[in-house]
Image: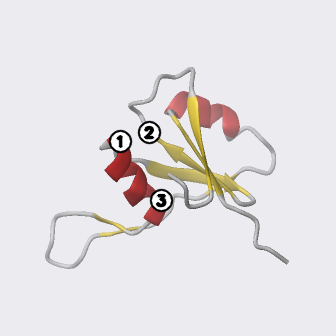
Amino acid sequence: MEKPQSIQIVANTYLLKKFSTIDIYQQDLGKSLIPQGEETIRIIDIFAKKYHTLTNNIILKSGKIGTISFYQDSALNQEIFVLFCGDNV
């Protein structure tokens, strides 16, 4: 059986608040790393790295519903969200 593709939704804080009211929404703040002795954060999340390369915006993981992950990009207009499927960014 084929593994289902992951889906990522990127939105601003306003829309993420709306998504988080769904009963099966789970908060998931993702991962990042600050190596000892360094002051910079290394982005471990592969999708967040690709998104940053594409848009030059830093996103934060907010939560998930099954295989759908939600990310916050505060630079987005409050009336839109962006949908990514699988590894295609």
Which quadrant is the N terminus positioned in?
bottom right
Residue at 62% from the left image edge and 59% from the top image edge = 86
| Residue found at the far right of this picture | 1
Give the spatial CA distance, label 1 vs label 3.
Answer: 12 Å
SS for tag 2? loop
Q: Amino acid at mark 3?
A: Phe
Disc marking residue 1: none
Q: Look at the numbered discs 1 and 2 and tell me whether their residues touch, using CB distance below 8 Å.
A: yes
1 or 2: tag closer to the N-terminus: 1
SS for tag 3? helix
On screen, residue 8 above or below 1: above
Across and down, in percent, residue 66 comes to 75, 59
What residue is shown with label 1? Answer: 55
Q: Look at the numbered discs 1 and 3 and tell me whether their residues touch, using CB distance below 8 Å.
A: no
Disc marking residue 47: 3
Disc marking residue 73: 2
Asked whether, in this view, residue 76 is left or right of residue 39, the answer is right
Question: Label 3 crowding class (10 Å Cα cut-off): few <14, some 14-19, many 20+?
Answer: some
Q: Amino acid at mark 2?
A: Asp
On screen, residue 1 above or below 76: below
Q: Of residues 86 and 75, which is closer to you in this image?
A: 86
